[in-house]
Image (spheres, helix red, strand yellow):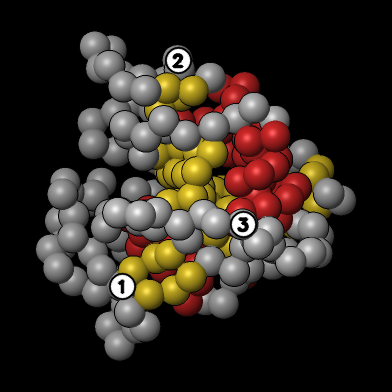
Amino acid sequence: MTILLTGFTPFGGDAINPSWEVARRFAGRVIGGHRVEAVELPTTFAGAPRALRAALRWHDPALTLCLGLARGRRALSLERVAVNLIDARIPDNAGLQPIDRPVRRRGAPAHFSPLPLKRMQAAAQAAGVPCELSLSAGSFVCNAVLYHLLAEGAYGGFLHLPDVAGYVPAGLEVPTIRVEEARVGVERVLAAALVAEADLRVAGGAVC
């Protein structure tokens, strides 16, 4: 009975990626009777899916949640959908910058997360942690990892973190949350995802 929690290596010139700093804090913990295994994924289009598939085979998790950094956001963002598109604004850590390419050739146009995202959002918000639903995981490695995860048929999803206070590059002014907020938020969404109940029937869409 395992939960797989992943984060990424630093990218874009940063020395630290808060997604891994948060994920590794959960290694060995037990949530809802499930032991958490934390795995760091390389921020590369080739390496991340290989590492993810290896972790899925090794741990055979009941639940997988991948964490990533979304600089500029102000809340934890639960991603609803992964699209079959790579359009990299910057190179990955291997120096590759694919433009307008599919994540998987002959793959479905998109995959939706099977997680009870609205219930997970409500659980984080009840703990005082800002949390939102997101309709875009971007077009970089985060979206590619979510697409591969869902294409593998895994029960899982993706959570983008804002910048975490204490891990922001010097001189950069961006919205942040505290480490403890991130930790509590991740813990609450994981616990909510393990509850065998239907998702909440509340509006969560966007007008624009």
Identify which amino acid the numbered label 1 is placed on: Asn
The residue under the point 35% across, 63% down is 144
Q: Position of residue 44 (x, y in %)?
A: 31, 54
State which tag comes first along the sequence, 3 or 1.
1
Question: Is label 3 or label 2 in front?
Answer: 3
Residue 188 percent coordinates (x, y): 70, 40
Nearer the observer: mark 2 or 1; the answer is 1
* Label 3 close to label 2 by CB (< 8 Å): no
* Helix, strand or loop status at disc 2: loop
From the viewer's perspective, is 169 left or right of 3? left
Amino acid found under the numbered disc labelled 2: Gly
Residue 75 image offset from top left, x and y in percent: 47, 34
**Vertical placement of residue 130 versus 123, above or below:** above
Q: Residue at x 38, y 75 (%)?
A: 110
Residue 174 image-quadrant placement = top left
Q: From the top left corner, tell me how far across and down residue 131 is, in percent.
A: 54, 39
Amino acid type, residue under disc 3 in the picture? Val
Residue marked by disc 2: 166
The image's mark for residue 202 is 3
Front position in the image: 152 or 125: 125
- The residue identified by callout 1 is 84
> Closest to the observer: 55 or 159?
159
Label 3 and label 1: CA atoms lie apart by 28 Å
Residue drawn at point x = 24 percent, y = 74 percent: 102
Going by the image, does 134 lie left or right of 204?
left
Q: Is residue 70 placed above or below 114 in the rendered structure?
A: above
* Side (left or right) of 155 relative to 146: right
> Is label 2 in contact with label 1 (beta carbons under 8 Å)?
no
